[in-house]
Amino acid sequence: MNKKIVLVDCEGGDWEGLYIDGKLADEGHRLTVYGVLTALNIEFDIEEASGDAMDKMGCSFPADIKDFITEVK
């Protein structure tokens, strides 16, 4: 990949910026993983867990993705 990535966090945390190779790629009150990966042109999948599934996993994500639960059956 070899890109120069700089994250800028304004004092007080009210605005953030993402620079890739010196050019502004994204900015906002909070940068998201989705926005950063998209700006870096990295393919990714999104999984969504229900509240019941998160409760079953102990309200935290498992160390291994194979143990990830999206819904309780």
Image: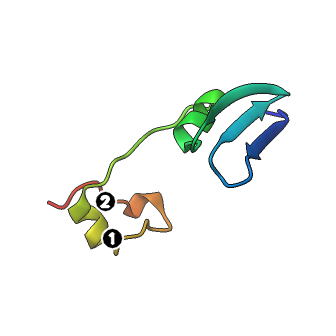
Cα separation, mark 1 vs mark 2, equals 7 Å
Q: Nearer the viewer, residue 55 or 43?
A: 55
How does the figure colour the protein chain or chains? Answer: rainbow
Q: Measured from the top left, where is residue 68 in percent x and y?
A: 37, 60
The residue that label 1 is drawn on is 57
Q: Residue at x 46, y 38 (%)?
A: 45
On the rendered image, what quadrant is the C terminus found in?
bottom left
Q: Nearer the viewer, residue 66 or 62?
A: 62
> Residue 61's image quarter?
bottom left
Q: Residues within 10 Å of mark 2 (few under 14, many from 20)?
A: some
Q: Measured from the top left, where is residue 30 in percent x and y?
A: 57, 44
Q: Residues within 10 Å of mark 1 (few under 14, many from 20)?
A: some
Q: Is residue 47 above or below residue 17?
A: below
Q: Is residue 39 above or below residue 34?
A: above
Q: Measured from the top left, where is residue 44 in percent x and y?
A: 52, 36
Side of 71 relative to 18 (left or right) = left
Nearer-N-terminus badge (1/2): 1
Proximity of marks 1 and 2: CB atoms separated by less than 8 Å: yes
> Residue 2's image quarter?
top right
Query: Identity of the amino acid at label 2?
Result: Ile
Q: Residue at x 44, y 68 (%)?
A: 62
Q: Nearer the viewer, residue 55 or 6?
A: 6
Q: Residue at x 35, y 71 (%)?
A: 59
Side of 69 relative to 28 (left or right) = left
The residue that label 2 is drawn on is 69
Of all residues, the one furthest to the bottom in this rendering is 58
On the rendered image, what quadrant is the N terminus found in?
top right
Secondary structure of the residue carrying numbered label 1: loop
Query: Identity of the amino acid at label 1?
Result: Met
Secondary structure of the residue carrying numbered label 2: loop
Q: Measured from the top left, where is residue 12 in percent x and y?
A: 68, 55
Of all residues, the one furthest to the front in this rendering is 12
